[in-house]
Amino acid sequence: MNALFTILTVLIVIAAVLLILVVLLQNGKGQGMASNFVAGNQTFGVRQTADILEKITWGLVAFIIVVSVIASFTTGTSGTGIDVTDRIENVATDEQPAFPTAPVDQTAPSTETPAE
């Protein structure tokens, strides 16, 4: 695996954990965890704390999206030149059918009545 891809993946995981923490800190309709920090932090005020947390949330979301797109371009190709659909078709033709048909017994007498 590419070293750059690994670094970007670690950054995405760290940003995701931070995003979880910031969302839990936000003051929702049910008075979230942010209400615990408001009493000791009166200099910023309740509204300004909520604005900062919202900006951090959107910033982390944008960071995760941008880094995810960049990471998708760093994976590269192995240069085999074989299309994935060709591999799927080859695998499908090599396998046995899921429900094989039963062999027809030619020696058994016919149960059909002859037409008159």
Image (spheres, rainbow, N blue to C red):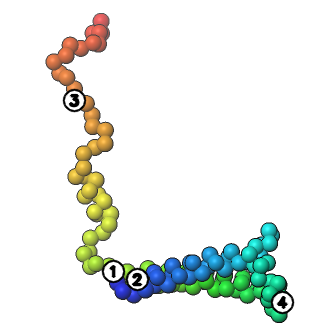
Residue 103, disc: 3
Nearer-N-terminus badge (2/1): 1
* Rendered view: 85 above or below 63: above
- Separation (CA) of disc 4 from disc 3: 84 Å
- Separation (CA) of disc 2 from disc 3: 54 Å
Q: Could one spot residue 69 in this view of the protein?
A: no
Mark 1 lies on a secondary structure that is loop
- What residue is disc 1 on? 1
Q: Are marks 2 and 3 in contact (CB under 8 Å)?
A: no
- What residue is disc 2 on? 6
Q: Quadrant of residue 17?
A: bottom right
> Which quadrant: the C terminus?
top left
- What residue is disc 4 on? 42
Residue depicted at x 51% and y 79%: 13
Residue 71, disc: none
Residue type at tag 3: Pro
Q: Left or right: where does residue 38 sit relative to residue 102?
A: right
For the residues carrying marks 1 and 4, which lies nearer the camera in this image?
Answer: 4
- Separation (CA) of disc 4 from disc 2: 41 Å
Residue 72 pos. (x, y %):
44, 79
